Image (tube, rainbow, N blue to C red):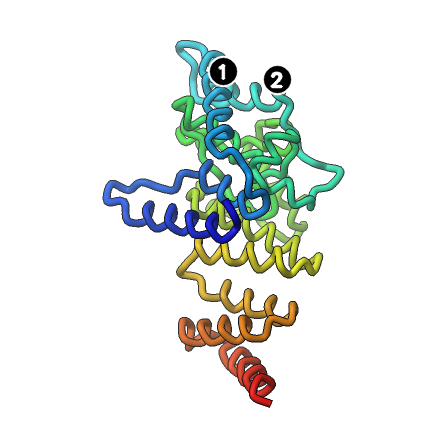
Amino acid sequence: MNADDAILELGKLVESAAADEVGGDIDLGLGALLIACTDSPNIDIDGVLLNLDRMASAASGRIPSDGNELQQLNAVTDLLFSVIGLAGNRDDYYDPRNSYLNHVLERRLGIPITLSLVCIEVGRRAGIPIVGIGMPGHFLIRHRDEPNFFVDCFNGGLLLSQDECGALMREAAGDAVRLEAYHLDPVTPREILARILRNLKAIYWDREEFDRCIIIIGALMAVLPDHPEEQRDRGVVHLKAGNHDQSAEDFAAYIEAAPDAEDIDTVRNALSRLRDSQSS
């Protein structure tokens, strides 16, 4: 599956979840693998999903018959971090492979959000409701029905109290940041996929790998079709890459979609200069 097809399927996945009248949500594992297909077109998606099923079966066998929420959660995290050996990549945190699920499972290395994603998906398959917590600077998980304790997957499944989450957030995002209650609210699968893509977007943008950045922003547009600023940003990257026609198309679409945006005059001026250069 090439990148264009993967983005198309990602958009269909988001659209079908939004249209589900019974409140269904995005298949997080499949969504993450479609993101990975934008980088590695030959991924065996069914094979990776089967591997997650096997992990879930192993996790289920580790739960005591009368296990409480924390014991259920520990069955997943202990298996993944102590037995299988998943770990946070401290040596090269910004390696893009840390954000692609196939590479995370193959290399057993990831960043907080992708390691958390593995826990969520293994838990879901094992009947353990694990939710993602989009704390600024450091993604966490917790059991859906145990709101007082959280797990830091980057640090080997470390169990944290709310106060310890605050200390971790200050360490990750700066001392001026204060933990608010909503920082520890569960996030949706769509928000998780968008955060993974934004991480990749920032990496490729900083590296000036414009072709890769354009692909990732296209995936972001599929996951967040109601965020026109992503099309504006793709226009900026196209401009940096020298793709003036594509840049003009994106800027024009952004102007149409967000006519009252604060930066609309800046984008209009950029589009005007582009069109002047194309006609000269």
* Alpha carbon distance from label 1 to label 2: 11 Å
Q: Is residue 16 above or below residue 158?
A: below
Residue most extreme to the right = 91
Element under disc 2:
helix
Identified by mark 2, the residue type is Val
Q: Earlier in the sequence, mark 1 or mark 2?
A: 1
Which residue is the site of mark 1?
58
Question: Residue at position x 42%, y 47% from top?
Answer: 9
Which residue is the site of mark 2?
83
Name the image quarter holding the C terminus: bottom right
Local crowd size for mark 2, using a 10 Å CA cut-off: few (<14), some (14–19), many (≥20): few
Residue most extreme to the top = 65
Q: Is residue 13 above or below residue 90?
A: below
Question: Residue at position x 46%, y 31% from top?
Answer: 46
Q: How many marks?
A: 2
Q: Position of residue 255 (x, y in %)?
A: 45, 76
- Label annotation for residue 199: none
Element under disc 1:
helix
Identified by mark 1, the residue type is Ala
Local crowd size for mark 1, using a 10 Å CA cut-off: few (<14), some (14–19), many (≥20): some
Q: Are marks 1 and 2 in contact (CB under 8 Å)?
A: yes
Residue most extreme to the bottom = 280
Q: Position of residue 7 (x, y in %)?
A: 47, 51
Q: Position of residue 16 (x, y in %)?
A: 32, 47
- 13 relative to 2 in the view: left or right: left
Q: Position of residue 186 (x, y in %)?
A: 44, 41
The quarter of the displayed image where residue 226 is located: bottom left
Question: Residue at position x 59%, y 27% from top?
Answer: 157
Question: Residue at position x 53%, y 78% from top?
Answer: 267
